[in-house]
Amino acid sequence: MKISSPRGTSDILPDQIAAWQALEQTARTLFKTYGYSEIRTPVFEDTGLFKRSLGETTEVVNKQLLEVKSQREGAADDAAFALRPEGTASVVRAYNQYDLGREEFLSKLFYIAPMFRGERPQKGRLRQFHQIGAEAIGRGADHPLLDAEIIALSVELLKSFGLSDFKLKINSLGSAQDKQKFADWLRAELKDKISHLSDTCKDQYERNVFRLLDSKDEDCKKVVQGLNIGTRHLSDSGLKYFEEVKKGLDQLGVAYEVSSQLVRGLDYYTHTVFEISYAGLGAQDALGAGGRYNGLIEQLGGGDRRFPEPVGAIGFALGMERILLALEAQGKTVVSKPSIDVFAVAGKLEFEKDVFALVNLLRENGISADMDFGCGRAVKKQFDQANKLGARFVLVLGEEEMRHGTVGFKNMFTGDQTDVPRNEIILKIKSML
Ligand code: HAM
């Protein structure tokens, strides 16, 4: 029986790898420009970390955590691990664990990594997917211009991947107190309107009323659309902060739309939240999202009594699979083309060992080289293989060449062929690369 990859996961095959590497390379370069350093955290963490940060009532924790169980006998405690559904919680855990704030006023960290959620798979929604994410954490992170910078960075990333026509929505949830006020107001407004809604919506009303604002349920959507939310929940300082963020975005020339219904599906957010979508993707149209999460550092045991300033934090994550889908929809897919400097061909099976030695010599000299392991396949077949690998030059060791101590040399771009003395072949190729 053939075994396939688990549902909701996919292999990235060699002909797709150039597109992935292009995203990664572009992201790394841009992160450097903005002063971000890479961080790599474990693929699994204590389940409690996600419960405490993302929130027990969120879909991600409540329904989608993929738990890791140890087979080791008596390893009861080991059962309490889960594959990371996102990167923020782990980065904050690491920030606290290594006391990164002791030395750094502001830690700017990025990651490019696989994430795992037990979702119902569909186009653009996977159980293993990849995020390009960034988190700015520290005493220097509580500044509206940093919100503008990080939003601009996520937009700039998408642009530099070659994407266009995406839309940025922003909103502010305000401080923790503002957010509570917002939740109370929502409950009061919806109290008389939820009786005819589905059980799921009623449950969301009870457990996490914000979820109703991005519900996919049609009845619920209608009710929510009738709400006049605005910025009523924001205190003066919350409102002022949001105004500064918007001014920062205007200054950077970043186009945005303010959406008072944007609340995000994870509990840790306060103040600024944002989402970038591309309509061409259909139902799963979010290319990326992020926001501020000022209280999370303390909530996970961090925070710094040594310094007067509170620790702030803001970040985002972009979904790589969705970016690639959007690039495909816009006809901008990067195609992988194999390429190698040299392919060496054996005119006869008995010269295979000499070809093997020649390939090895080329590699020792930093020239990428390969050969056919076909046990004496016809020369034509070996040339076909050279073409498939995108070889620039083909070297042939046949009867004549072996007798005269030469190598047949063919330039695959121009078609030119010559004989080159064996001891000159490295210099010849190097001069042409
Ligand atoms: P999120 O909105 O859950 O936020 O995910 C960010 C992006 O990851 C989404 O917009 C989407 O592109 C992609 N994504 C999420 N789930 C899936 C899935 N099942 N299949 C494919 N792509 C998916 C976060 O993860 C936050 N940690 C973002 C953040 C960072 N906030 C602050 N810092």
Image (cartoon, rainbow, N blue to C red):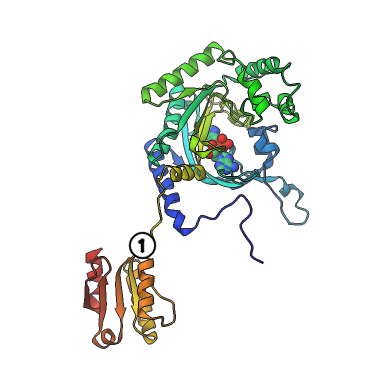
| Labels in figure, total | 1
Residue 265: quadrant of the picture: top right
Q: Residues within 10 Å of mark 1 (few under 14, many from 20)?
A: some
At 73% from the left edge and 56% from the top edge, which residue is drawn?
A: 71
Q: Residue at x 71, y 27 (%)?
A: 201
Q: Position of residue 140 (x, y in %)?
A: 47, 26
Quarter location, residue 225: top right
Whole-percent x, y for residue 210 in the image: 64, 25
Q: Is residue 418 above or below residue 56?
A: below
> Can residue 343 be spotted in the picture?
yes
**Residue type for callout 1:** Ser
* Residue 91 higher or lower than 178, as above or below: below
Q: Is residue 349 left or right of residue 284?
A: left
Q: Which residue is mark 1?
A: 339
**Can residue 95 be seen by looking at this rendering?**
no
Residue under the image location 70 percent in, 39 percent down: 63
